[in-house]
Amino acid sequence: MKRSKRRGSRSDGNLVGVVGWIFADTLLVLVVVFLATQTGGAVSLPAPTTSTTTPTTTTSTAPPAVDSGYVCFLVTADVVLRDKSPSPQRDAALKSVEDQMWARLAQPDLAGRRAGVVLTFGTADHADPGEVSAAAFNAEVLPRLGRFSHREDGSVVASRAFWGGNPKEGEPDGAITVNVYPLIEGAHGPLTEPPPVNC
């Protein structure tokens, strides 16, 4: 009786071991099948055909980018720009600045170009009036400059107004220094000339 029990326990152990090995082998087969069916594996190439195709070249246009260089120039402006109340004197001062801008934009370094960013610096004895002059330029002159100062969606180009320091020779009270960072687009590549030293 003892021997029969001993034999039964051994056969039961062997059966469990065999089932375990079958399970492990089956799992291994499933893993191999899974790996073989993944798209990251080998890709079969189509059979070559006798027809000839003409290669086509596609050219993609790079989106506009803002130049890291800039064009710097000075426009003279009447201090009346700091007065936010409408008046004939203020309108005339704005028109004068606009005319100076159109003349400057016709020069070779900016002709036909669009601005990417415009920074303006108002000259005054103190920071507040200088920033007011520069902000008046950004808000009221830039929108008048057509394609130069407008994005594709019609909005006015990004701009910031700063104080440009105290008046000095060649840069009187109310003058505005304009820094234009143009767009690199189409036939207009990066600027090649450095900005003037006195800017």
Image (spheres, helix red, strand yellow):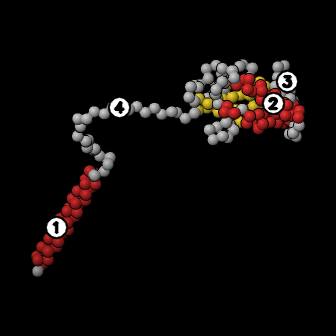
Q: Earlier in the sequence, mark 1 or mark 3?
A: 1
Q: Which residue is mark 3?
A: 172
Nearer mark to the viewer, of 3 and 2:
2
Question: Can residue 166 be seen by looking at this rendering?
Answer: no
Foreground residue among 35 and 14: 35
Nearer mark to the viewer, of 1 and 3:
3
Label 1, label 4: how many angstroms apart (C-alpha)? 67 Å
Q: Earlier in the sequence, mark 4 or mark 3?
A: 4
Q: Earlier in the sequence, mark 4 or mark 2?
A: 4
**Residue 164 appears in which quarter of the rendering?**
top right
In percent of width and height, residue 35 lies at 28, 51
Q: Which residue is mark 4?
A: 55
29 versus 83 height, above or below: below
Q: Earlier in the sequence, mark 1 or mark 4?
A: 1
193 versus 67 height, above or below: above
In percent of width and height, residue 195 lies at 68, 21
User: What kind of residue is marked 3?
Assistant: Pro
In percent of width and height, residue 155 lies at 67, 41
Q: Which residue is depicted at the point 75% across and 20% down? A: 198
Q: Earlier in the sequence, mark 1 or mark 2?
A: 1
Q: Which residue is mark 1?
A: 14
User: What kind of residue is marked 2?
Assistant: Lys
Q: Earlier in the sequence, mark 3 or mark 2?
A: 2
Label 4, label 3: how many angstroms apart (C-alpha)? 63 Å
Q: Which residue is mark 2?
A: 95
Instruction: Determine the secondary structure under disc 4.
Output: loop
For the N terminus, the quadrant is bottom left
User: What kind of residue is marked 1?
Assistant: Asn
